[in-house]
Amino acid sequence: MIKNYFKIAWRNLTRNKVSSTINISGLAIGLACVLLIGMYVNDEFGYDAFFKDANRIYRVNIDGKMGNDEFVAGHTPPTAGAALMNNFPEVESYTRIYKPGNEIIHYEKDGQKNSLNEQNLLSVDSNFLQFFNYALVAGNAATCLNGTNSVVLTQKAAKKYFGNANPMGKTLVFDEYSLPFTVTGVLKDLPAQSSLQFDMLQSNLGMPPVKRFSWSWVWLQMSTYVKLRNVTNAAAITKLETKFSQMVSQQAASAFKRIGQPFDEFKKNGGRWDLHLQPLTEVHLYSGNIVTAFITQGSIKNVYIFSAIALFIILLACVNFMNLATAQSAKRAKEVGIRKVLGSLRKQLVGQFITEALLYCLFAAVIAVVMVVLVLPYFNQLANKALSLSAFLDIRTWLAIVGLVLLTGLLAGSYPAFFLTSFKPVSVLKGNLFNSTTGKFVTRNALVVFQFTVSTALIVCTIVVYKQLKYSQSKDLGFAKENVVVISNADRLGDSEESLRQELLTLPQVSSASISTSVPTKNSFGDFYTPEADANNTKSDETKITLSSFIVDENFIPTMGFKMVKGRAFAKDFADSASVILNETAAKQIGWKDAIGKSILYPGNGNQKFKVIGVVKDFNVESLHSTVSPFALFYTTSKSYYTGSSYITVRIKPGDYNKTINALQSKWKQFMPDTPFEYSFLDAEFDALYRADKTISQVFSVFTVLSLTVACMGLLGLAIYTAERRTKEIGIRKVLGASVKNVVAMLSTDFLKLVLIASLIAFPIAWYAMNKWLQDFAYRTTISWWVFALAGFATVVIALLTVSFQSVKAAIANPVKSLRSE
């Protein structure tokens, strides 16, 4: 019987070539989308699951509030790990990670001295490689990070620095310390599914900032991970977290007092300084609202969006199959009627039609796998992934494909099977099929509406995402980001920093240049400050405000194009070393209507006093996902005032950018011949902040095209069968004087009505979805009426073009032929 099912299914497939092609093509596109998205989702959920004790490892996050500033961060105080392990027996061990700035590394390769700028360097505790069981190809995990001048490389880094030579025992000189570091271990290249990505590890034992702030409960520059024992469920984790508050209050008291903020008063004034645990396997996908810089971060929202799109496209393909199968009901009805008269049971007929659907899905699955193999490189580029075809070597992948084929076949074939087998033999053989099944065609129209509802909604989403990206790129950030070159590693220049800046100004392509500890898109320094109380200040000296800050020279504000709202900018002619410029948000949060002449105190340096000389217009240092935070610009001409990284910001004139960069590099080499010239364009840095949003935009665009393709293929199939069913009607109408235009309008109107209904349903759904998506942006575009008008118009035009070809073909056919066929 099964053999007979497949034989009849094959005959029907080859007999109806047009519908078979449409069905198989639609199902193949749908299955390919599901396979690609399935690979993407599996990869996203697989992050960090390969670690031996992944289910026992948690990242320590801090939930803080000071004044009006609230945040959740994956950076904790250096003391948090030890405090947790010493106070709670559930904590078995901990390890910490610190991200230093870029490091210039000098090395010898093939007998020649070289220098490289290393950006992927982490400083870690000595037990890091025991805590996270990354695979070592050389060295001992228990001892290779015990020395202050020890360094561990990945295989990729080892090859970069030493070629094919054995790197063990070789020396790398870190420019910042002018000390040799010995290679004590080599790691196998890290799995792509590791949320921590690095090329080089050094020990925290030799890291000055870590030692300097080892006492602090307010220096949030390290990530802490703990490994728990006998804690296996969410309820137990929550119970453990409730115990942290008292411990933090006791441990942090002295640290807060040291910065002039008694912890009891801090808590009494509404402050919050709580520790929470986040499962390691959730760090990659569930850190969207957590400030962190150490991990490769994904988004669970993107996973949901991609999954929903794949689901909708496979549903569209199934709907195509259902619609085309029921559209052919007139052809299959007599077959069903005769089979029933000859004694076939309904379950046998259902089995026949399900078998046909499964055969279609089987052919589609083969094509889908080929499509995945061909488009995987482009999908990786689209989704910023590194998915591999090795997934097809896993038996679980093939089991998933088989399951997908069976599920799709049952979903696509179930409705046609039960619909077609419901015909009464007497009605069919008497020719009363369409009189008895009129209500069934309402279902088919509903399915068409569903298809174009999905497609129209995706068009709206694509337009809104693109509109938000354009808004992000064009919004006034409070400064001019175009034509600005940022030169990194300027701190390596030492006392020659200002001399190089002056040399750069001699270049005709350079308009201005400045020196600062950081620039927008880079890290800023954040700390607590106290507004000084006076007769006109509504705030008391007990109130603290968190300020992010840069230390800048007098050229920074004009070079960046910041706009002064009140007061003045820094100037060499004034004694501005104890001065500060606030942004509008900082002045407003403190409560100053006129901040000029007021002062803020820095408890971290003995209540050092800074006088406010100006207020600058709010500016964005991060993406538009984040609100403008209270910000301060401090002034100094002395390099000794600060340590750490610094940048030279150069505003250049439009023109030959390659020539300008070569000129800047030439000047750099005059001062630093052995140090690589590292630069970036500020506008490119801002564009990089929206990489994930661009991915969403590209995905929406591609899958919108695919959904429209699948929906239009189904619409084309329905148009073909509608035209065939009404061939004689068209012939009679033409004989009676109907024009081609009249016939085309008659055949197209019914479909266009369905498309218009679909658009009206899609608009509120798309508006709701995009409104929720836009909530992730602190500054966002509006969802204008023309977005819906454009989407609706595009859908109608595409649908009209799809059905008009077949309608015109039917309308211009010779009516004599159709009437003779009677």
Image (tube, grey):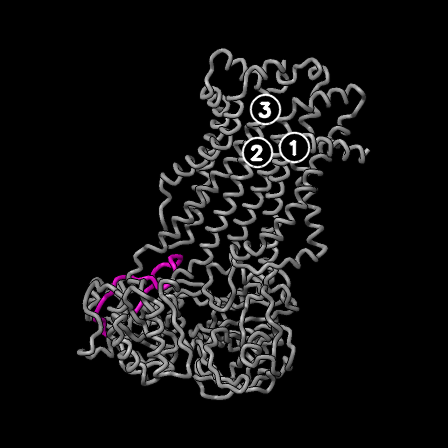
Tell me which label, 1 or 3, sits earlier in the chain. Answer: 1
Q: Determine which quarter of the picture holds residue 681.
A: bottom left
Decide which of 11, 763 is in the foreground and name it.
Answer: 11
Identify residue for label 3: 441
Identify residue for label 2: 714
Residue 419 falls left or right of residue 283: right
Few, some or many C-alpha atoms within 10 Å of disc 1 (few <14, some 14-19, many ≥20)? few
Few, some or many C-alpha atoms within 10 Å of disc 2 (few <14, some 14-19, many ≥20)? many
**Which SS class for mark 1?**
helix
Q: In this view, does 282 lie above or below 138?
A: above
Query: In the image, what residue type sits under mark 2?
Result: Gly
Tell me which label, 1 or 2, sits earlier in the chain. Answer: 1
Residue 119 part of the magenta segment: no
Q: Give the range drawn in magenta.
A: 611-632
Residue 114 falls left or right of residue 10: left
**Which SS class for mark 3?**
helix
Residue 612 part of the magenta segment: yes
Residue at 38% over, 66% down: 521
Residue 259 falls left or right of residue 561: right
